[in-house]
Amino acid sequence: MAHNTGFRAWYYFRMGWSTYFAFIFAAINTLTITYYLTIEKIPSLKEVFPNFFYYVGITSLIGIPILVLVGYAHYKRTRAFKSEVDILLESNPYVSRVLTNSEMLLRLNLELNKFIIKLAKNEEITKNEADELFKLQEQFSKLIDERTFTSKHDLDFLRKTRGLDK
């Protein structure tokens, strides 16, 4: 796999900037602007927040728990995160390839385990059972032969096996 140092550095820069640096700057900027342009100009609010440090402290005590709850809701209680994952799966062929490979390995291992258990019990494998395994092998071989990172075969396979045909 070829590594392009310039683009990798650009990616790391953007992640560092957007995840950490911009977040901290945005928080400081928002607190500063809201205090000095709003709170300081309204006497009744100035009584509640006598100085900038009280404002930061009180806002943090209230804001941080609210933001944690919003983040929790994003991941656990709304469909927003599921939509993000769906988009990642649709747009990143490496993710769909890994999931497809995992699904195939899991299904194949389960089928092979059935055979191993039957053989361990000295039971015969029926022609239908063998045919099912051959059919699964053919299905996987066909997918492996036809798929590319630019095709949607992996995504189609995942949707079909999970009953998500759209």
Image (cartoon, rainbow, N blue to C red):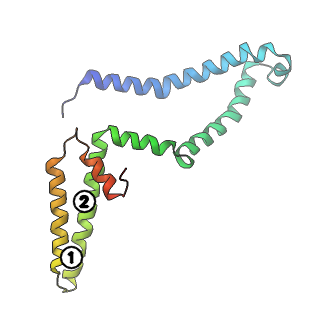
Q: Amino acid at mark 2?
A: Leu
Q: Position of residue 64 (x, y in %)?
A: 64, 35
> Which amino acid, by three-letter code, is at mark 1?
Ile
Mark 1 Cα shell of 10 Å, populated few (<14), some (14-19), many (≥20): some
Image spot of residue 139 (x, y percent) = 18, 59
Q: In the rendered image, which residue does mark 1 sit on?
A: 116
Q: Is residue 160 left or right of residue 149?
A: right
Q: Please name the residue that numbered disc 2 is placed on.
A: 105
Dividing the picture into quadrants, the one containing residue 115 is bottom left
Mark 2: few/some/many CA within 10 Å (<14, 14-19, 20+): few
Q: Earlier in the sequence, mark 1 or mark 2?
A: 2
Residue at position x 66%, y 39% from top?
65
Element assignment for label 1: helix
Residue 47 location (% of width, % of height):
85, 21
Residue 57 sits above or below residue 29 on the image: below
- Distance Cα–Cα, label 1 vs label 2: 16 Å
Of residues 40 and 123, the one drawn nearer to the viewer in this rendering: 123
Q: Nearer the viewer, residue 139 or 19?
A: 139
Q: Residue at x 33, y 37 (%)?
A: 91
Image quadrant in which you'd find residue 29: top right
| Quadrant of the rendering where the N terminus is positioned | top left
